[in-house]
Image (spheres, rainbow, N blue to C red):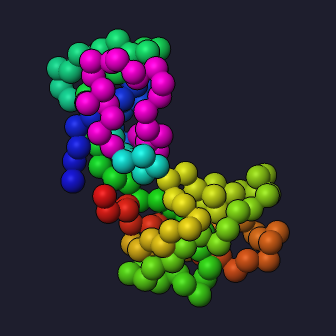
Amino acid sequence: MTTVTLIGTRLAEAGVEFVYHGESSACEGCPYRDQCLNLTEGHKYRVESVREGANTLDCAVHDTGVTAVEVEPAPIRVNVASNTAFAGSRASLEGPCPHTNCPSHEFCEPAGADFDEEYRIGEVVGDPPHDHCMLDRDLTLVEFDPPVD
């Protein structure tokens, strides 16, 4: 379901994905609060389109202002245990990983997914980007469906 919101003009391009982090202290007293703060904190979104003819509005958080866009919840690519990696099944993240230089780190600790939550697997992508997991985990790269608000 598409939602109209305001985001920083640097992010306002179709296809850009971001995790909504909620209200900043700089938002206090802003006349556009209701249009900006209408997403679910911690969820990942994809810009579907920039509203045609939308004005750039001044913003205390975004130095180049904000503009109106249409967003949809976005799937999240993650590594899960291979024995749970089936489209339509539910899975959770395996847990934190200290190996930040690993090519799979962004999929083991993805933005927009929590370790204590279960998500529905929408698609099995395949092998993860790493050759060997330094924690000896047997992992498969999948896409979690966006959480339902």
> Going 61% across and 82% down the picture, which residue do you hit?
82
Which residue is more in the foreground, 127 or 73? Answer: 73
Q: Is residue 24 found left or right of 35 in the rendered image?
A: right
User: Residue at image x 30%, y 26%?
Assistant: 33
- In this rendering, the answer to whether 41 lies above or below 29 is below
x and y percentages locating residue 59 in the rendered image: 39, 16
| Label tally | 0
Which image quarter: residue 119? bottom left
At a point 26% along the width and 30% down the height, the residue shown is 34
Q: Between residues 125 and 1, which one lies in front from this camera angle? A: 1
Task: Please provide the residue range marked out in magenta.
Answer: 16-39
Q: Work out whether residue 43 can be spotted.
A: yes
Provide residue 131's location: percent of width, then percent of height. Answer: 75, 69
Q: Position of residue 139 (x, y in %)?
A: 65, 76
Q: Judge whether residue 127 can be spotted in this image.
A: no
Check if residue 32 falls in the magenta segment. Answer: yes
Q: Nearer the viewer, residue 133 or 93?
A: 93
137 and 6: which is toward the camera: 6
Q: Extreme right residue here? A: 134
16 vs 70, left or right, is right
Q: Quadrant of residue 3?
A: top left
Q: Is residue 122 left or right of residue 21?
A: left
Q: Quadrant of the C terminus?
A: bottom left
Q: Is residue 84 left or right of residue 6?
A: right
Residue 61 among magenta residues: no
State the residue at coordinates (50%, 53%): 112
Residue 49 vs 10, above or below: the answer is below
Q: Position of residue 114 (x, y in %)?
A: 54, 61
In the current view of this chain or complex, which residue is farthest to the bottom?
A: 83
List the single residue furthest toward the front.
Answer: 29
